[in-house]
Amino acid sequence: MRATTSRHKPTKIPRPRLPDIPDEKLDARQRKLLDAIRSGPRGKVSKGGPFGVYLHAPEYGDLTQRLGAHCRYKTAVPQRLSELAILCTARHWRAQYEWFAHAAQAEGAGVAPATIAAIRAGRSPKTAPEDERAIYDFAAQLYRTRRVSDRNYARVRAFLGDAGTVELVGILGYYALVSMTLNVFNVALPDHVVPAFAEPRPG
């Protein structure tokens, strides 16, 4: 699935609310944070996405990026299911950059393009494997009702176990935090990328 495709009329993200900080203007704490991000499991990332926001509050940013690195790379949740949970979160929050960053990651991890398209459209991925549908139903119910039923809890626990279920909630929570960060600060997409979701009208 290409991140640049869209079924709705092209929409534009509002102007970013925080300035980009050029590398040569980073102070010692900000540079230490950027070095920590780039030396971790993410590799040499840009200052796009939430990372440019974190640089404006580097103490907070360091704690947050470390939690994010754990949630993304070190949990008992398989990457395929983790990426699917991230897409559920991006769809719930209409987080444009999060969807752009993770749709291709999800497909690369084994999530079918039809499943990705269904999540983007806000539909249950009915042709997805049972474990993916269980993750989708768990996340969708949690975001919709702020609770999870015994049935949906048991479905996820059956293949993730106790530790993995705890970490799944952590993944959903961390990427909800990322989504809010991206949305509040109007984090820009790369120039060539069409937003995945229609932007709401200014309130």
Image (cartoon, helix red, strand yellow):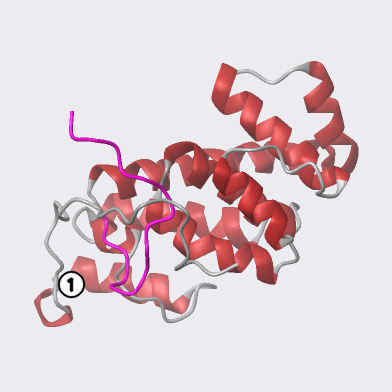
Which quadrant of the view contains residue 116?
bottom right
Residue 98 or 71: which is nearer the viewer? 98
Task: Pinpoint residue 153: horizontal percent, then vertical percent.
Answer: 78, 26
Residue 129 or 42: which is nearer the viewer? 129
Residue 12 or 69: which is nearer the viewer? 12
Picture layout, residue 200 above or below residue 105: above
Task: Pinpoint residue 138: horizontal percent, then vertical percent.
Answer: 70, 31
Q: Amino acid at mark 1?
A: Ala
| Magenta part, dominant SS | loop
Q: How many marks?
A: 1
At x 83%, y 45%, the residue is: 131
Residue assigned mark 1:
28
Task: Pinpoint residue 127: horizontal percent, then vertical percent.
Answer: 82, 47
Residue 2 or 64: which is nearer the viewer? 2
Q: Quadrant of the N terminus?
A: bottom right
Which quadrant of the view contains residue 133?
top right
Q: Quadrant of the C terminus?
A: top left
Residue 74 seen in the figure: yes
Residue 163 seen in the figure: no
Residue 52 placement, left or right of 154: left
At x 59%, y 58%, the residue is: 72
Magenta residues span 187-203
Task: Pinpoint residue 173: horizontal percent, then vertical percent.
Answer: 52, 38
The answer to if 154 sits in the magenta stretch is no
Residue 56 placement, left or right of 149: left
At x 58%, y 38%, the residue is: 122
Label 1 SS? helix
